[in-house]
Image: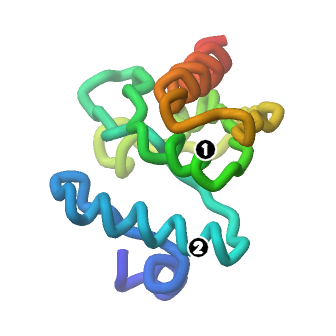
Amino acid sequence: MLNNPVLKLFFKTIDVPVNRDSKMSSFRAFKKVGENLDKGMSLIIFPEGKIDETHYPPVLQSFKNGPFRLAIDKKIPIVAVSLQDVWKKMWDDGSKYGTRPGLCHIYIHKPIPTSELNIEESDMLKDRIFALINTKISE
């Protein structure tokens, strides 16, 4: 991906990479994202711990706790987004199931405030967001 000039620009400037097999990498990414939030940057996180390519059609995977702890710690509202049928257009890299043009249905949920929550409620918040997104993508 770094050979593509557009993707290279993205990955070298605003992306915060995470090696999901390394706790140290996760910690560094968590710190970097916190610093970016403190600078007023917006953030997009895909909170699934992994993308399981063995289920077709896909199943939403459980969420990691970090993004929700960070939102509570920084008192930042969460705007959940449900990508309902994007997988139907491009499931994998295109080699197994192919790709096709078309419209995707993306639903932006109302912001969920975190200012009144404490860190101990991060699991509750994580479960709430998971249910919200999963319900919408299952429609």
**Viewer-nearest of labels 1 and 2?**
1
> What residue is shown with label 2?
36
Q: Quadrant of residue 39?
A: bottom right
Can residue 103 be seen in this snapshot? no
Q: Residue at 53% across / 40% down in the picture? A: 68
The amino acid type of the residue labelled 2 equals Asn
Spot the residue most to the left: 21
Q: Quadrant of residue 101?
A: top right
Residue 84 falls left or right of residue 35: right
Q: Nearer the viewer, residue 86 or 73?
A: 73
Q: Are marks 1 and 2 in contact (CB under 8 Å)?
A: no
The quadrant of the image that shows the C terminus is top right
Q: Quadrant of residue 131?
A: top right
Residue 4 falls left or right of residue 138: left
The amino acid type of the residue labelled 1 equals Ile
The quadrant of the image that shows the N terminus is bottom left
Task: Locate residue 21, reporting x and y percent.
Answer: 16, 53
> What residue is shown with label 1?
72
- Near mark 1 (Cα within 10 A), the count class, few <14, some 14-19 or many ≥20, is many
- Near mark 2 (Cα within 10 A), the count class, few <14, some 14-19 or many ≥20, is some
Which comes before the other along the chain, label 1 or label 2?
A: 2
Task: Locate residue 25, reporting x and y percent.
Answer: 25, 65
Identify the element where label 1 is drawn.
Answer: helix
The answer to whether 67 is drawn above or below residue 56 in the figure is: below
Q: CA distance from mark 1 to mark 2?
A: 15 Å
Q: Residue at 60% across / 48% down in the picture? A: 71
The answer to whether 50 is drawn above or below residue 44 in the figure is: above
Q: Residue at 51% across / 84% down in the picture? A: 13
Identify the element where label 2 is drawn.
Answer: helix
Can residue 97 be seen in this snapshot? yes
Residue 116 falls left or right of residue 134: right
